[in-house]
Image: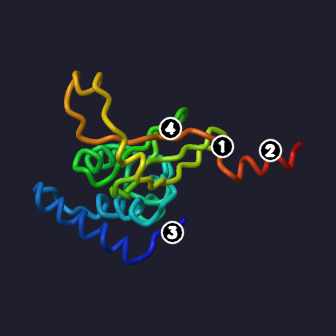
Amino acid sequence: MTVPKREINRRMRRFQAVCRRHGLKLTHQRTEIFRELASTAEHPDAETVYRQVHERIPAVSLDTMYRTLALLEDKGLIRKAEVRSGPGRYDANTDRHHHFVCTECGRVADVYCDEMDNLPVPASVRKIGTVTSCHVRLDGICSRCAGRKRERQ
């Protein structure tokens, strides 16, 4: 799934502004790693991002990839979507949303839902501390995998 050019440009402007605000260099490798994530709604893992960026920048290392992804996550430019098994997946969409994870194929899809955004914080959690954000992960079987299962039956 591709992201509209207008949205990619918005994400890239935000990336540049955040880097400037935190005194981070806008290196070519860092920019291309972020651009790869900003250009997709697929939620790729680090090695997938590495393969794509490595085609354009053969000098980029896997170590640089992991360090850059950690930095981008730390600065709030990307989110890491944890999946049940396998490596974490990355998302440059920092708008408020949740994730649906297919337990068959591993697909990660964005979910926008006002009801989940407004879940009340249980009293038992408020006793522990203050909640500053909440991300819901929905595990299930995507429609593609469900269709394949029906075809096999």
Element marked by disc 2: helix
Query: Mark 1 is on which residue type?
Result: Ile
Frontmost residue, 55 versus 104: 104
Q: How crowded is mark 4: few (under 14 residues within 10 Å), some or many (20 or more)?
A: many
Name the spot of residue 110 as percent of width and height, x first. Answer: 48, 54
Residue 35, image quadrant: bottom left
Q: Distance between the residues labelled 1 and 2?
A: 10 Å
Q: Distance between the residues labelled 1 and 4?
A: 13 Å
Q: Name the residue under label 1.
A: 141
Q: Do the residues labelled 1 and 2 touch (CB within 8 Å)?
A: yes
Query: Mark 3 is on which residue type?
Result: Thr
Residue at 52 percent across and 53 percent down: it is: 109
Q: Name the residue under label 3.
A: 2
Q: Mark 4 points at which residue?
A: 83
**Mark 1 or 3, closer to the camera:** 1
**Residue 149: numbered disc:** 2
Q: How crowded is mark 3: few (under 14 residues within 10 Å), some or many (20 or more)?
A: few
**Residue 48: numbered disc:** none
Name the spot of residue 80 as percent of width and height, x first. Answer: 39, 44
Q: Earlier in the sequence, mark 4 or mark 2?
A: 4
Q: Is residue 139 left or right of residue 65?
A: right
Q: Distance between the residues labelled 3 and 4?
A: 21 Å
Please say if 83 is above or below 127. Answer: below
Residue at 47 percent across and 63 percent down: it is: 40
Q: Which of marks 2 and 3 is nearer the N terminus?
A: 3
Element marked by disc 1: loop
Please say if 41 is above or below 107. Answer: below
